[in-house]
């Protein structure tokens, strides 16, 4: 199950990214990590979700949610000069002309799209109502 090492790598990358940002207050909590995952990435979404819970335990990402956007396979056909989404990953032929696609444009991704954080209560501005 290589999904555990992938989840651990994502946790490490997020932690390093946050550490490199001095504008993020200490004690901020990661609430959500958004991931773009291509269907050809050889990663099983359910396994990655399961491993996420293990990988974030005892880290600053504990209790964060992993949101995965699955990306279909997109191919380019040089004959038709079209980009097309494939219905499955069994045949890499152009849906228009049936010839083999010349290029895979999407479907192999494994990318962190965004990180959502929540700042600690003490660092948030507090509105004070002035009474006279």
Image (tube, grey):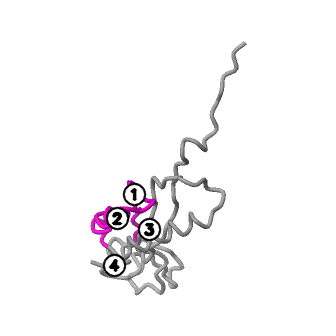
Q: Which residue is mark 2?
A: 52
Q: On the image, numbered disc 3 is attached to which residue?
A: 11
- Identify which residue is drawn at 30% across, 80% down: 90
| Camera-side mark, 4 or 3 | 3
SS under mark 2: helix
Give the CA distance from mark 1 to mark 2: 10 Å
In space, the residues marked 1 and 3 are separated at their CA atoms by 10 Å
Residue annotated with mark 4: 42
Dots 1, 2 in contact, CB < 8 A = no
Residue 110, percent from left and from top: 44, 73
Which residue is nearer to you in this view: 39 or 48?
48
Q: Neighbour class for label 2 at 10 Å: few (<14), some, many (≥20)? A: many
* Among the two numbered marks 1 and 2 on one chain, the one whose residue lies closer to the N terminus: 2
Distance between the Cα atoms at labels 4 and 2?
A: 16 Å
Instruction: Name the mark nearer the viewer: 4 or 1.
Output: 1
Q: Is residue 107 above or below residue 130?
A: below
Residue on which disc 1 sits: 62
- Check residue 69 for magenta coloring: yes
Q: Earlier in the sequence, mark 1 or mark 3?
A: 3
Q: Marks 4 and 2: which is nearer the front? A: 2
């Amino acid at each position: 199950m290589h999904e555990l090492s992938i989840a651990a790598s994502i946790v490490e990358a997020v932690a390093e990214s946050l550490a490199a940002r001095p504008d993020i207050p200490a004690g901020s909590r990661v609430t959500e990590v958004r991931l773009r995952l291509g269907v050809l990435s050889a990663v099983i979404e359910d396994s990655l979700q399961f491993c996420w819970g293990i990988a974030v335990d005892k880290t600053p990402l504990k209790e964060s949610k992993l949101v995965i956007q699955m990306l279909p396979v997109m191919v380019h056909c040089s004959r038709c000069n079209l980009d097309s989404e494939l219905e499955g990953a069994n045949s890499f032929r152009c849906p228009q002309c049936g010839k083999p696609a010349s290029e895979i444009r999407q479907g192999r991704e494994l990318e962190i799209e965004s990180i959502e954080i929540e700042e600690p209560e003490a660092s948030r501005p507090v509105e004070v109502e002035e009474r006279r």
